Image (spheres, rainbow, N blue to C red):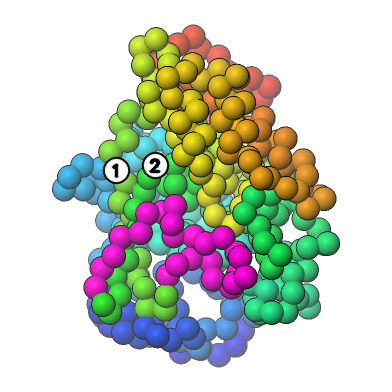
Amino acid sequence: MSPFELSTAADAAAAIHACSGNPAARFIAGGTNLLDLMKEGVMRPAHLVDINTLPLDFIRPGESGGLLLGALARNADTAWHPLVRERYPLLSSAILAGASPQLRNMASNGGNLLQRTRCMYFYDLATPCNKREPGSGCSAIGGLTRQHAILGASRCCIATHPSDMCVALAALDAVVHVQNAGGNRAIPLRELHRLPGEHPEHDTVLEPGDLVTHIALPDAAQFAAHSVYLKLRDRLSYAFALVSVAAALDLDEDGTVREARLALGGVAHKPWRVPAAEDALRGRLPDDDAGARAAEILLEGAAGQGDNDFKIELARRAILRALKVARTGTVTNSGDNTRRQQRSAAPQQRPYPNDRRAP
Ligand code: SF4
């Protein structure tokens, strides 16, 4: 690991001052991704500013409703918080679908937003990578692409964003609050992460010195009874998504959709959400016909790279499955097991009909 200076922030202003305009300085909280990147030599910050002393580990109701998640609240504390479990089961399930219990105990909410791609070439210093070294080329194009993007990719980078939490946050219309030397600003989660374009080295719209303080969740009670985070991956735990779907439905008494939320993970450089796909569900029963139309819109323009061509059909089927499950209730993830919370009067069925391990 390259040598670096470590300082502890006395307050938010001091932390921001230490990192403002200085791309060689980084905030560190849980360090579950950054330290790996430093050990591999992928990132070599000259100065780390430990922000764990800042009072940003809260989880509390917002003054005008909703919920505020502090940037330093740990992923595990967030996923298991009673208000998150009750009001935002989609978010709880998404967090618990990611990483491992040990990692979730350390990882912060702010760090989860800002974690970097797990493209294997990004971590391999022996291969060119535009994200690691701008202008050097992309080894994934023409290489091994099973985990790579089918949407929003560019000629410079076809990496995917690895977070599960962010997919649920995108579906829930979360807003990321940021403080810097010039003041505060609010960024809708859907606008936080960038597509790679010509500059894949920039994962987000944040600049050095931008400190994520908290994530604001609007009230989403109407979705709590019909939501699911469906994650498809190469093994049942501790693996990144090949494709994931965050689906939430607000259903009328006759079962038609008042409002829907659909977001995909594992398919692009950012959580993928297309409002027109949700519009296509409104006023209809969320059956396979309506789901197929929503999937068609969500996946418009999808293109494989060879190894990952299968993701297009996998995503289409995952969308149909997620809608089918959400229609009949809410599925909550307990980390190792999937459990159904039967909140709906709709007939019971297995959350994942082909999975005999599911209750
Ligand atoms: Fe690097 Fe992106 Fe290409 Fe992966 S896909 S090698 S992260 S430029």
Q: Residue at 49% x, 69% y: name it.
A: 31
Q: Residue at 39% x, 10% y: name it.
A: 254
- Crowding at dot 2, Cα within 10 Å, few <14 / some 14-19 / many 20+, comes out as many
Look at the picture and state if 316 lies above or below 125.
Answer: above
Question: Dot 2: what SS?
Answer: loop
Q: Quadrant of residue 84?
A: top left
Labelled pair 1, 2 in contact (Cβ < 8 Å): yes
Q: CA distance from mark 1 to mark 2?
A: 7 Å
The label on residue 69 is none
Quarter occupied by the C terminus: top right
Residue type, mark 2 in image: Leu
Q: Which residues are magenta?
A: 183-206
Quarter occupied by the N terminus: bottom right
**What x and y, as percent, mark residue 307?**
81, 50
Q: Which residue is mark 2?
A: 172
Q: Examine the structure image and report whether residue 180 is included in the region drawn in magenta.
A: no
Task: Give the number of marks.
Answer: 2
Most foreground residue, 37 or 190: 190
Residue at disc 1, CB closer than 8 Å to ligand 1? no
Look at the picture and state if 79 lies above or below 45.
Answer: above
Going from N to C along the chain, the mark reached first, 1 or 2, is 2
Would residue 216 be visible to someone looking at this image? yes
Most foreground residue, 299 or 122: 299
Q: Residue at 69% x, 79% y: name it.
A: 135
Q: Which residue is mark 1?
A: 218
Q: Residue at 37% x, 23% y: name it.
A: 258
Residue type, mark 1 in image: Pro
**What x and y, as percent, mark residue 157?**
68, 65
**What x and y, as percent, mark residue 81?**
34, 43
